[in-house]
Amino acid sequence: MSNLTPDKTCSCGAPIAFVPSVATGRLVCLNVAPDEAKGNIVVVDGKARLVQRNALYEPVVAGPYYLSHQATCPDVDKYRKPKKK
């Protein structure tokens, strides 16, 4: 799969897709276009998996690599939950 299918558009105008996490089952918001340079999430069998990537090790899972939309969204503060006191 080269691109995810957009589920909706964020308030910033970017197309996004929601994919369940392998680890928690919670939905992860991803940019739909792969980001081979910065991406650290792969989608395997319809589930998002965080992948450790660095220059010393070959990635365990082949790409395409996606980036969480929270890392690039200029409107991210609108969607953050307030910190508990």
Image (cartoon, grey):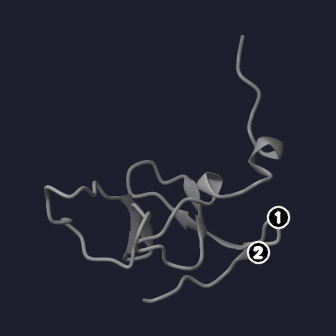
What is the residue that sits farthest to the bottom in this orientation?
A: 2
Q: Quadrant of the rendered structure where residue 1 is?
A: bottom left
Circle 2: residue type = Lys
Please determine whether, in this image, residue 78 is positioned above or below residue 46: above
Task: In the rendered structure, find residue 12 and report the number of the disc placed on it.
Answer: 1
The residue to which callout 2 is attached is 8
Near-viewer residue (22 or 55):
55
Say few, some or many: other residues with alpha carbon within 10 Å of mark 1 (under 14 / 14 to 19 / 20 or more). few
The answer to whether mark 2 and mark 1 are in CB contact below 8 A is no
| Image-based side of 80 in relation to 36, left or right | right
| Image-based side of 50 in relation to 53, left or right | right
What is the residue that sits farthest to the left in this orientation?
A: 57
User: In what element is the residue under mark 1?
Assistant: loop
Circle 1: residue type = Cys
Q: Which residue sits at x=59%, y=77%? A: 32
Residue 70 spot, x, y in % from top left:
63, 53
| Image-based side of 23 in relation to 18, left or right | left
Residue 29 spot, x, y in % from top left:
61, 61
